[in-house]
Amino acid sequence: MAKVAKKAAKKAPAKSPAKASPKSSSKKIKRVYFFGAGKAEGKAEQKLLLGGKGANLADMTLAGLPVPPGFTITTETCRDYNDLKQKMPAGLLEEVKDHLARTEKASSKKFGDPKNPLLLAVRSGAAISMPGMMDTVLNVGLNDVVVEGLAQLTNNARFAYDCYRRLINMFGDTVMGVPHEEFEHALSEVKASVGAAADTDLRTADLKLVVEKYKAIYKKGTGEDFPQDGLKQLALSIEAVFKSWMGDRAIAYRRINDVRGLSGTAVNVQTMVFGNMGDDSATGVAFTRNPSTGEDRFYGEFLVNAQGEDVVAGIRTPLDCDTEMGKWSKKSWKELLVVKDKLEARYKDVQDFEFTIERGKLYMLQTRAGKRNTKAAVKIAADMVKEKLIDEKTAILRVDPASLDQLLHPMFDPKAKRNVIAKGLPASPGAAVGKLAFTADEAHERAHNGEKVILLRKETSPEDVQGMHSAAGILTSTGGMTSHAAVVARGWGKTCVVGAGALVIDERSKTLRIQGSDKVYGPDSVVSIDGSTGEVIEGSLPMVDPEMTGPFAQIMKWADKYRTITVRTNADSPADANKAREFGAEGIGLCRTEHMFFEGGRIKHMREMILATDVDARKAALAKLLPYQRDDFVGIFKAMNGLPVTIRLLDPPLHEFLPHAEEDQAELARDTGKTLAEVKARVSQLHEANPMLGHRGDRLAVTYPEILEMQVRAIIEAACIVKKEKVKVLPEIMIPLAGTKKELDYLKTYTVETANAVMKEQGVKVDWMYGTMIEVPRAALTADEIAHTAEFFSFGTNDLTQMTFGYSRDDVNSFLPDYLAKDILEKDPFQSLDQTGVGKLVKMAVDAGRKTKKGLKCGICGEHGGDPKSVEFCVGVGLDYVSCSPFRVPIARLAAAHAAIKASKK
Amino acid sequence: MAKVAKKAAKKAPAKSPAKASPKSSSKKIKRVYFFGAGKAEGKAEQKLLLGGKGANLADMTLAGLPVPPGFTITTETCRDYNDLKQKMPAGLLEEVKDHLARTEKASSKKFGDPKNPLLLAVRSGAAISMPGMMDTVLNVGLNDVVVEGLAQLTNNARFAYDCYRRLINMFGDTVMGVPHEEFEHALSEVKASVGAAADTDLRTADLKLVVEKYKAIYKKGTGEDFPQDGLKQLALSIEAVFKSWMGDRAIAYRRINDVRGLSGTAVNVQTMVFGNMGDDSATGVAFTRNPSTGEDRFYGEFLVNAQGEDVVAGIRTPLDCDTEMGKWSKKSWKELLVVKDKLEARYKDVQDFEFTIERGKLYMLQTRAGKRNTKAAVKIAADMVKEKLIDEKTAILRVDPASLDQLLHPMFDPKAKRNVIAKGLPASPGAAVGKLAFTADEAHERAHNGEKVILLRKETSPEDVQGMHSAAGILTSTGGMTSHAAVVARGWGKTCVVGAGALVIDERSKTLRIQGSDKVYGPDSVVSIDGSTGEVIEGSLPMVDPEMTGPFAQIMKWADKYRTITVRTNADSPADANKAREFGAEGIGLCRTEHMFFEGGRIKHMREMILATDVDARKAALAKLLPYQRDDFVGIFKAMNGLPVTIRLLDPPLHEFLPHAEEDQAELARDTGKTLAEVKARVSQLHEANPMLGHRGDRLAVTYPEILEMQVRAIIEAACIVKKEKVKVLPEIMIPLAGTKKELDYLKTYTVETANAVMKEQGVKVDWMYGTMIEVPRAALTADEIAHTAEFFSFGTNDLTQMTFGYSRDDVNSFLPDYLAKDILEKDPFQSLDQTGVGKLVKMAVDAGRKTKKGLKCGICGEHGGDPKSVEFCVGVGLDYVSCSPFRVPIARLAAAHAAIKASKK
C-alpha cells in the first residue's frame, strides 16, 4: 500500500470517537457507584454513565424512597470490557468488592454468610430502556451451604430452595448458555411426578429434587459443577450483562429502534428482596397513570408470593394494583399510592416502576419514564399542563411527532357488525387486520413479501422482535398488560391484544382453534384485532377516520403556537384537499396534475395527444382535455379558498400513459384511426433505458409547449372562474425537473403569454406565481441563476435523493437492505432526508436562491416533508414551508413545533 | 402574476448584456469609420467593432497597402438595427452620406455622376469570419444613366452593361429576394439565342438585352421598378447586410461553429475596383502560404477579366497565382509577392487575402488570418518559430487542440490497391469512406440515422452547410481550392475533394456516372475519397495509422514543455496501452475491467457466477475468472512499465452479462445445469427500471464482496508477478459509484486484507493505492468525508453529468436536440463539461478533498478528459491529470499547454 494510505491508517485511531483508553489512562477511572441507606454516589442526570435504571436507583435513594442498597457499574466499563475483547478492565473486581462491603454494611447482611446471607440481583440498565434485551441474574450468592442458612433464617426451606433452583436456572441459562428448555423440562417432570399443577404446588422436597436435577443439567451443559463461590457467580454474572450488550438480539433492537451513540449497558448489583417469601410478600410493576389511555389512575399489576420475572414473563396472570391490592393489604396499597404521587412530583412525568413487598415491607426496585402509546402521551401531556406539572413546550416535546401516525389512521367502524371470536387484554390500541402468522420468522417473511399479517403467539419473547415489528398487529393467548408483547407493542404504537386465553394455537400445524368452537383458522384466515377493546374478530372489519378533538386538538393548538414554519399538503383532488384542511394544512404544496389525465375518458384523449403526429393534432387532443383539467382546478381552488395552491405541470414520461398489452394497443389503434403498427411504433419510440432520467418533467414542455399552454390555460381559467365567485385563489405554477435557468426562461414566456391571454378573455386579474421544483442536482447547484427566473423553489427531495445518491427508487431494494444491514447507511434516505449530502444541496440552493432574490419562498414537497427529523432539518435551513400527505400534516405541525422549541433552547 | 414576478420582469432589461440603447444615449455614437488614401479612423484591434474585414481594411490602409477607399459601419449598428426591429438607427444615413463624400474625395470620383461615377461594393464582415454566410452587393450606384457614362469613360460598353446586369441580379436576389434562378434562366436564354457558350462570349447588345430582361424580372418579383436612386440602392444594400446577420443560414453557421457573443456584422462600403475591365484586369484570392500543406509558397488563384464572386463561386476554373500569373503579367505578380511578404511581416501569420487588378493596377480588398487545416497549421506554426516570426507559446496557441483529431485518425493504407475512378483537387486532406448522398438534406438525414455518407454535389452553397457537416466527406465535380466546399471543409478538417470534372451527377435520379465509363453508382455505392491526393476510389479502402513525426512532434514537444498537468489514457488492453504510450500518455487513468469478462470463454464463467445461488458457488466461478483477469493485468502492467495504472473494479449491472434471447438462455441453462425457468427467473430478477441508478458499481461489491476480492487478488497477483520481472508497477485500485464514506470503508477492509494476503503469498511488496471515482453527486458533496478513506479521486464526469442533470445518456436524444436548437443548452454536456453545474461539483470536491488530505491526487476519467475546453477547466480547478481515449491524448496534451499558457498570461 502506498505511503498516503499508511499515514491515513496510522492516523485512524485518533479520529475514532473520543474515548479514554482503558490501558493508557494514568488517572484512575471511577467505575462503580454506590447507593443505599439514603446516600448515593450517582445522580439522576448521569443516565449516560449509570444507565437509566442506575441513575434512577441513585435518585430514588436520595429521595428517601425505600431502595434496597447496592451499586452500579458504569456503561463505560461495559465499553472497555468489549473493547478489551471481553476481558474485565484491571481493578474492576477490587472496586466491586469494596462496594460489596458497603452494600453489606447498608443491608446489615453478609455475602456468603449462611447465618445472615446477602443475596444479590445483577441487572443490566442502559441509558435508553431496552426491555428484555439484556440479561438479569437473581439470587446471586446462594450455594449449597447458604441455601440452608437462608432456610433457617427465614424459617422457610421451601422458599430457600425455590430461590436456589431459580439461581441455577438463570445463571446456567443466562451466564453459561445452558438451554433454558432443559431446566423447564426437568421442572415439568418433577411437577408431573408429584402431581403438582402449578410451581407453587411443589413442596420443599420436590424443590430439593429440582435443585439436584438442575445441577446435573448445569454440569452436563458446562462440564463443571455449579460454582459454590459467590464472588465467582457475581463476576460471571457481571460479565454476562456486559456481553449481552453485544448480543445479536440487543444489536437488532438498537438498529430497529434507532438507538445510537451509547457506550454500553451499566450493571446494577443490588440487595435481593423477595416477593416470594410467602403470602405476605408480593412483586409488581405499575405505572403512575394508565399508559394505554392516559387516564390519571394508578395502573399496575402484582403477583403475591412471586419474583419479578414472573410478572414480566406473563406466566401467571397477575392482579390489578388499583382494584385488588387493597383487598390483599391495605397498608401496602396506601404506601404504594404515596410513592406513586412522590414519583410524579419528582419526575414530572408518568413513571413505570417495579416494586417488591417482602414480608409486608415495600421496596422500590426501579423507576423510569413510562412508555405510553400516543393517545395516552397526548392526554397525559395535556393533563399535566392543566395540573401545572409541566409547561406547554414540555408538553409538546412529550409527544413524539412520528407516533401521531397511530392516532391519524383509521379505526374500526363502530357501526360495523363484529363477529368476535375471542377477547383478550387491550394491550396497545389501534386496529389491525391481517392473515395469521404463527411464528415471528413467518411474520417477518410474509410481511416482507407484501402481506399484512397478525403475529399469533402464546407469548412473545425478545427473539421475536423482528417478526413483531413486521406484523400489522400482535395477538397472544397468555400474558398481561406488562407482558413482553404488550410493552414492546405499545412502544411502537402497534396494535396488540394479549392474554386471549380462548385461543388454542398449534404452531407446528399452523392452526388456530377457539375453545368451544369447531372452527379451524389457518395461515390464510383473516382476523381483525382491536387494541382498544381486546377483541379478536373474524374477517376484515371496515375502518373509519379518527376524531381530532380533545387533548389532541389541545396539543396541536400549542404546537401551532410555537412552530415557525408553514405546513402544506400534497393533494391532487378536492377530497384530499378537504381532508388536509381538516388536518390543519395551510395550503397545497404539491398538486400533481398527471393523475388528472388517467380518470375515466380522459386517458383516451391523452393517448390521442401522444399519438398525434403534428402540432395541430396534438392541440386538438389537448383541447378535449382542457375542460376536465379546468374543472379539477375549480374544485381544488374552492376547497383551498384563501390558501395557496402549488400546481406542478405534467411530469411523467409519456409512455406511462400508453397501454402495453397488445389487445389494449389494438383498441387504441381502432379508437384513434391508427394502425396497430403505428401504435406499437410510438410505444417503442417512447421506450427508455432509464425513464427516470429521460424525456419527462419540463423536458416534455420544451418539446411540446402546447401541453404547457393547455395546463396553464386550465389553471388560469379555473382561477378566473372561482375568483368571480369570490373565492380567494392563489395559484403557484410549478415547473418540474428544470436543471437550467434557460429552460425556465423559455417556458416562462409561454406561461406568461397564455396566462395574460386567458385573463384578458375572462376580464379577471389573478395573482399567480411562476416557480420551479428543485429536484435535479444541477438546479440546486445553479440556484443563484435559477432564482432570477423562478419566484419560488419547492424541493422535490424524492428525485433529488434519487439523483444525488444515484439510487433508483424502483430498484433500490436490490441493494438498500444490504446497505442498512451493513450499517453503510443509517437510514433509508427516501424515508428520512440525507442531511449530509442531499441536505447540503438543499441548503446551498436556499442560500444561493435568496442571495439572488431576497426572501425567496422555499418549501419542500418530497415525502420527507412528513418525516419529523427531516422537518427539523427544513426548519434549520430556513424553509418557509413543508408539504406532506394529508395524514402526515399533524405530524409535520408537531415536528415543526419540536424543531422550533429545540432551536429556541440552543 | 404576483408581485415578485413583476419586479423581476421590470428589472430584466437592466440585467441583459450591457449595451447602449440606441434611443436613450445622449452622447452621439460614432457608427461609421473611414479608410482611404493612407488614412483610417479604425484600427486593427477593433475587430469586435469593425469586423475582421473592416479592421484589416483600416490597418492595410495605414500600412500603405493599396486599398480602395471607403468606410465601415460598426457591428453595434447592426445590433441596434436588429434591436429596433430592423429599422435604421436615427442619424445613420447622414453619417453614411458624410463618409460617402470623403470616399468620393479619396477616390476622385462622384457617386451618381455619369461623367466620373463612383461605384460601391457593399460587403458584410463580422468579427469572426463566416465565409459565404452573409450578403454582398457590388456595383452599387449604377443606373440607366450612369451605365452609359461608365461605358464612355471606360470606352467599354460591354463592361459597363455587364456590371449593370450583375448589380440588378445581386440587388434583386440579395436585397429584394427575387429568386436567383430567374436571372440565371434569363441569362441562359439569351446565351442560347445568340449561341454564346460562356458569359464572356456575350456582346454589348446581348448584355443590354440581359439588362432589360433582368429589369422585367425585378419588377415582376418586387412590384417596383429597379431603383435608379443610387442612395436608395446603398441604403437598402446596407440593410440587407444587417438583416442577413439574423438569417437562418447565418444563425445555423454560428451554432455549428460555436460563434458567440458578437453584436452583429459590420458593413464595408468600398470604392469598386474592377477585375473585369478587360484582359489587363483580374481578380483573385490567395494565401501567403499553402493552407492545405503548410508549405511556404505563394498559394492562390486568379481569374482574368472577372469579378471576385466568380472565383469564390467556382463557376470558372481559375489559374494558379504562383505558376500562371507571371505568364499573364510579371509586374502584377511581383507586386503581389511583395504584398504577400508585407502581410506576413505585419500580421505574423498566414494571410488569406483578396485582390483585384484593374487595368494593371493592384488593389487589396481584404486580408485575414488564413484558415488552414491542421496539418498546415502545425507545419506553419513550427516553421514560423524557426523563422523567428513567432515564439513557441504563440506557435502552440496557433494549433487548435480539437483539430488535431484530423491528424490522429487513420489514413488510407498506401499499400492498398486503389481503383481510382476520378481525380479532383485535394481540397481538405484526410480519408473518408461512405455511401453516396446526392443532396445536403439526404446527407444530413442518413448520417443522423447512423450511415456514413459522402456528400456528392456539383458545387456546394451556404444552404448545404448542415449536410456538409454531417457527411463523412465532401466531393464536388466543379470548383477550385477556394470554392465554398473547399474553404468550409478545411475549416472543419473534413475530408474534401473538389472539381472532379469527370463526375456526371444526376441529383434527381440519384445516380453518378463517370465520363467514359458505363458504370452507374447510386445511393448504396461506397466510395473512398483521399483529401490529400484528390483521388476518388471505388469501394472501401483500408486505413493505417498516421505518423507522429516532424512538425507535429515539434509542436507536441513544446506543448509538453509548457503544460502543467499530466495526461493519462483510458485503456483496457495492452494494445490500447501501447498505442496510448505512443501518443504520449503518462499512465492509465481508467482501466475498465468489465470488458475483461466478455471475451472468449470468460463470459461463461461470469454467467455461472451470476447464476450461483450461494457464496461458495459464486467463489468457485470467480476462481475460474481469476487467471484470465490476472493475465490481462500482467500485460497492461508490462505495457505501462513505470507509469501508474488506475483500475476500476466491476461497474455495470449484472444483467448486462446475461443473454436475453431465449435460445441463448436455454444454452446457458444447459451449460450451468440449471433449468430454463431458473435462468429466466434470474434474468427477470436482475431487470431494473433504471439500471443507470441501480445495482451496479460498488453496490455489487457491497452485496458480493467476493467479486471485489477476486479482482483485487488478480490485480495484486499480477503486480507481484511483473515486479519479480523488474517491471515498475504502480496499481491504483479504484472503486466505482461510491456515494458515501462508509461504503468505501467497508470495501477498503476487504481490499486491504486481500492485497496483504496476496503479497504475503507472493513474498513481494507492491506499492498500491485505494481510491474512488467521484461520479455520484453525493460523493462530490461529501468529498471532505470521502477523502479520509480514498487516497485519490478520479472524476467520472460521464455519470456525474448524467446524475447532475438528470439526463440518461441512452435517452437524451429524445430531447437534447430540442435543447440545443432552442439554445437552452449551449453544448451537449456529454461532449463538453458543463462548468457551471457539474464543474461546480468537481471544484467543490477537489477543494474539500484536499482540505481533508493535503495534495490529494485528483484526475478526470470521463470522456471530457479529451475535450479541450474541459481540459482547460481541469487545469483551472487544479486537477493533477486528465485521462482520455488514446487518440485524444495529443489533443489533451496540447489543450493542457493552451490552458497553461493562457493562465500564465492572465
Image (tube, coloured by chain):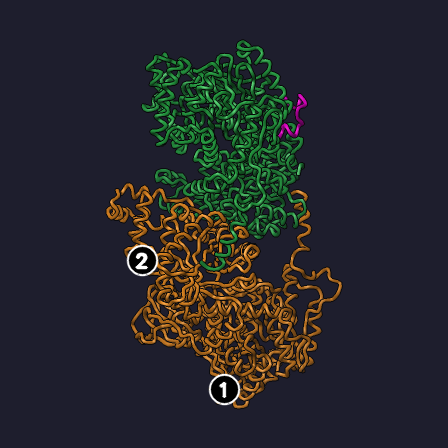
Chain colours: A green, B orange
Label 2 sits on residue? B628
Q: Is residue A384 magenta?
A: yes
Q: Quadrant of the N terminus of chain B?
A: top right
Check disc 1: other Cα within 10 Å, few if <14, some if 14-19, many if 20+. many
Label 1 sits on residue? B325
Range of magenta residues: A383-397
Picture coordinates of residue A507 (x, y %)? 35, 23
Query: Taking A617 as reference, is A492 above or below it?
Result: above
Q: Which mark is residue A127?
A: none
What's the amino acid at mark 2? Tyr
Q: Secondary structure at mark 2?
A: helix
Q: Quadrant of the C terminus of chain B?
A: bottom right
Q: Nearer the viewer, residue B771 or B180?
A: B771
Q: CA distance from mark 1 to mark 2?
A: 68 Å
> Residue furthest toward the top?
A327
Is residue A500 among what the camera can see?
yes
What's the amino acid at mark 1? Met
Question: Quick check: do tags 1 and 2 share a chain?
Answer: yes
Q: Residue at x 65, y 57 (%)?
A: B16
Picture coordinates of residue A773 (x, y %)? 56, 44
Q: Residue at x 28, y 55 (%)?
A: B601
Q: Nearer the viewer, residue A171 or A571?
A: A171
Asked which quadrant contains residue A453, the reply is top left
Q: Secondary structure at mark 1?
A: helix
Query: Taking B611 as reference, is B124 above or below it?
Result: below
